[in-house]
Image (tube, rainbow, N blue to C red):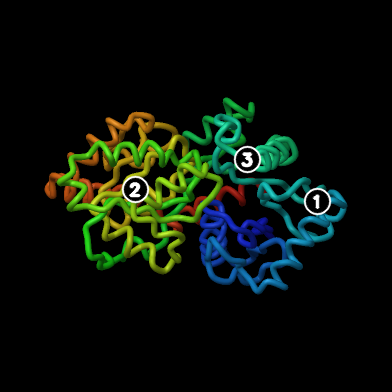
Amino acid sequence: MRITIDASSTLVRSAGVKTYTYHWIAHLRRQAAPGEEIAAYPFLHHLGQLNHERWALSLPAAALRLALVHAVNWLGPAALDGVVSGSDIFHASNLAHHAPRRARLTATVHDLTTFLMPELHTAGNIRADRTFSEQILRRANGLIAVSENTRQDAIRVLGISPERVTTIYSGVAQEYFDAAPAARAKQYALYVGAIEPRKNLETLLDAWQLLRADLREVFDLAIAGPMGWAPKATRERIRTEATYLGYVPEADLPGLVAGAAVFVYPSLYEGFGFPVAQAMAAGAPVVTSNTSCLPEITGDAAALVDPRSAGEIAAALARLLESPTLRAELSESGRQRAQRYRWETCAAQSLEFFRQIAG
């Protein structure tokens, strides 16, 4: 059985989908049985190093492969058939505009946020997801959803038949489970993620200002992540009301997360929530939203809050920052919960999914 996975997301600036694709393919290749081949489209024998701000390959190599993706999208299904010739299954990303005619079609549903909260996205993101839904998701022989909440959203919002969608949780890199806290001059609460409206950083900043002054003297609010399409006012507040760390390389993130007194993530919607799962694996006590998949992913191992309430976020932060005992309890329960999110488990379940699709 030959499975070709669309790995074009590894060639562009991306966040969660790039993390997923990179680690998923690596573990699928390690765990594939004899006679099972995991190929990566477009001709990505090696995925390079995971970096969300740079090309996965050299600039010329990445540019050539992206040009191929665009050419296939323009030429249509016959071109895709040629590129993935010999494959039993083609697993598409939202950069693919066509389904193959000679291979079975699958895809991963990461989230439905452009459908549920279009006001928080760019027009380009919305168009890409609409095309992906019409051309890929509704035609697929089978779909993977990264959480049960995302699966239910796909069924409800897109009208996908329940039997066509399988929930397989994403994983967390081993480096987070093994992380030692990085040394910093001052204790800190930490947010990690792209700076975009869905992540709700304005409300987080409002909540931080509600904390007592003595707590804010002891603890910093550190924000790490690339600047996305957040409004200018949000970007300015982040730089003046918090310690903005910018994009932190993948190698440095586990230690930064493990060293946080509290990890705070008040996102309005997540499909899986990599930063939260990674924080639990690293032993950081988590404050996160009581919406979308986040209660499912954290269980009872996080303090859950209404993400639109600065008061609730502030109260949860204060409880944890004032109580080393409570932080230690959440740290331990988070580590235990994170054991569910292993890439080895994800890959094993995904290979079984592909075997069933292939018949």
Q: Nearer the viewer, residue 164 or 125?
A: 125
- Residue at position x 70%, y 61% in the image: 41
Q: Write down the residue under mark 3.
A: 122
Identify the residue at horizontal 38%, vertical 67% (top origin). 252
On screen, residue 98 above or below 184: above
| In this rendering, position of residue 40 left or right of residue 69 | left
**Could you say which disc has been placed on residue 241 in the image?**
2
Does residue 184 appear in the picture of this structure? yes
Classify mark 3: residues with Cα within 10 Å, few (<14), some (14-19) or many (20+).
few
Towards the viewer: 296 or 211: 211
CA gap, disc 1 and disc 3: 21 Å
- Graded by Cα atoms within 10 Å as few (under 14), some (14 to 19) or many (20 or more), the crowding at tag 2 reads some
Q: Earlier in the sequence, mark 1 or mark 2?
A: 1
* SS class, disc 1: helix
What's the residue type where badge 1 is placed? Asn
Give me the C-alpha separation between circle 1 and circle 2.
Answer: 44 Å
Q: Amino acid at mark 3?
A: Thr
